[in-house]
Amino acid sequence: MERNQQSILPQKSSSFSSSTREEKLRDTDRNLSLGSIRLDTYERKERDLERDHPIAEESNENGEETAEQDAETKEEEAKDSIPDFTTLSDEIDQFLGILLSLKNDPDSDPGSSPELPESVVENFLAAVEKEIAKYESGEEKWVHHDPNHDEISLLAAVDRVSKLTTALTTYSSYPNYAGAVNRSGSVLHHAMSFLEDELHSLLEESRPKTDSKIKRPPSFSHNQEADHCVLPSAESSGGETTPTLPQETVESLHAIADVMMSSGYVTECCQVFTIARRNAFESCLSALGYEKSSIDEVLKMVWDSLEGEIATWIKVFRHAITTSFAHEGGLCGQVFANHRDIAHGIFSNFARGVVVQLLNFAEAVGMTKRSAEKLFKVLDMYEALRDSIPVIESFFPDEEEDGDGKSSVITDIKSELASVQSRLGEAAVAIFCDLESSIKTDTGKTPVPGGAVHPLTRYVMNYLKYACEYKNTLEQVFKEHQKPTSYNDESENSQPAQSHPPRRIDSHNPFASQMMEVMDLLHSNLEAKSKLYKDLALSNIFLMNNGRYVVQKIKGSAEINALLGDLWGRKRSSDLRQYHKNYQRETWSRVLACFKDDGLTVKGNVSKPVLKERFKNFNSLFEEIHKTQSSWVVSDDQLQSELRVSVSAVVVPAYRSFLGRFSQYLDPGRQTEKYIKFGPDDLETYIDELFDGNPTSMARRRT
């Protein structure tokens, strides 16, 4: 770059008005081109022809024909003697060399100026402007990437115009230079406008096509002052696209950018590039299904809609940080390879703009009303932000805080990420802790039919199972974002402490402590619900069902098991065994009492009336138990089998022994059938029908 840049996007050097460009263009010979130009001595030769061969005034037909033929011949000779564009360029370079040598010569007279080759300068500028106009009019397309075309020559010509303008400006106070200064400045401005359009077109060709086209506001136009540009708005900062540009396109972008920047049009070049890339990134967002939403719109979304938007946002955010950043950083580095500070500035602004734009949505999600179902999506967003930090840092490896105390780009981005990440983390902690409130407020007075697993138990355990799939993240979230007040003891207005012991807070793992609190609350709630059953046996079946469900869920989740520990698991298994014993005692102790020998003998003889009453009582009890408990529910197959086996193991042997000892005292025939309704095998069959949740009548079974 030919001049020192004072900032990432410095203002361009002063250039010139092009208000008379159209008039000059009309006065230019329409046959000029860069391929073959013969303009250096055209006017002088034409005057020589007129002087040496005057046309006779008399209207002689033969004389006129001769004069016309002579004129055409001389004109062709004059054209053949006009220098081509290469010659004109060489003469311009010689003139520039003279100006440069005078500038560097300390002995040169500062009050004098070198002779200005006006015709050479004008012919050269006219040729350049004519060539540009040909492409602008559509008469011919400026074909990029064609080695047989004039692309490189045109860029070199524009670069020569820039150098000429800069050199002439030194002598702008001299009257004989004033016209040339204005003329070259006008052509330069025209050329820069053309290159800006070409730069934009190349960038737009690579943008994903969408239904709505994002338009580029002009940075400057032909009728604007040359040093004025319209800066992009804050909303239009940053942009990226996914498709990879062909290498020849990148090379053309690099060549155009180099010429524009060396000509002092740094701001315009960077603005066109930045806005085009912004447009491309917006198109990429649309292609991925993401539409920007304001904070108010996010806050008003129903969860079903917001859940889908969050999933799309996560996909877009990860794509932007990994794919888009890498592609955009590489593109900036290639297009502005000779201007590393500019490339870094453009990419930094892009990265900052993308992050801020996408973080607006995440911040809005963190502000929405808390609800349990949002936890997992909030954690997904939290993880996306957390995982993005090392990726972003890799794009700014050498950035540190500036010496004047100003923060670097990576510092700003990390600060923005940390702020939103903290908001999401606090939201996640609050949502999870709300699970306690859900348990405490579930105080329904209607028992679950059949002692089945309570919906609260299923909900809490499934919720914890899914939550613990985010175990590492939740541990991080609770350590970094849980407020100390979350561990305060219950307020004075809360319910008295339940049977579980006070919670011991694990300062090293607050999430584990929170899990223990949830489990203790669930246990207390279930014990309270078990008291809704009037039948103590059914109450214990309820506790067994729910306790077994909890234990199985914990065993099926290594994460929950690790958080709660083996001691907690052993305690719950011990509780289950106790519930089992309680059930057997409440249900079958009365049945087993029928088989006792006490009271059956009177003076050493079996009392038939007492024996008959024992059989009647047993039959009645067993039929009632079968009728009632076949409607009870034990959904866990293993628990159901364990219960049936344990009942059979206690009841059937006792009954078989009782029959063996006392059935002989009943008269054979009708009396035996009346009092002995079940054989030992029948008992096993009926016991195997218990806990099916499907009441059956023995009378129907026997008929």
Image (cartoon, rainbow, N blue to C red):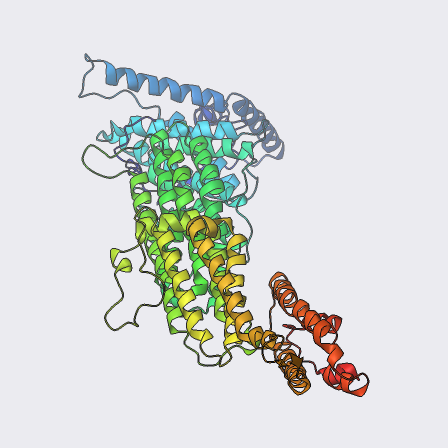
Q: Residue furthest front?
A: 603
Q: Quadrant of the N terminus?
A: top left
Q: Is residue 654 above or below residue 128?
A: below
Locate residue 290 relative to residue 605 in the image: left or right: left
- Image point (31%, 68%), residue name: 497
- Image point (37%, 36%), residue name: 393
Q: Is residue 667 visible?
A: yes
Q: Is residue 124 above or below residue 443?
A: above
Q: Residue furthest top?
A: 107
Q: Is residue 23 visible?
A: no
**Percent x, y of residue 641:** 64, 63
Q: Nearer the viewer, residue 340 or 268?
A: 340
Number of callouts in the render?
Answer: 0
**Percent x, y of residue 472:** 42, 47
Q: Is residue 44 above or below residue 220?
A: above
Could you say which quadrant of the image residue 23 lies in? top left
Q: Nearer the viewer, residue 101 or 352?
A: 352
Q: Nearer the viewer, residue 641 or 528?
A: 641
Q: Nearer the viewer, residue 144 or 601?
A: 601
**Percent x, y of residue 692:** 65, 73
Could you say which quadrant of the image residue 117 lies in? top left
Locate residue 651 relative to residue 201 in the image: left or right: right
Q: Quadrant of the C terminus?
A: bottom right
Could you say which quadrant of the image residue 424 lies in? bottom left
**Percent x, y of residue 10:** 29, 37
Q: Residue furthest right?
A: 669
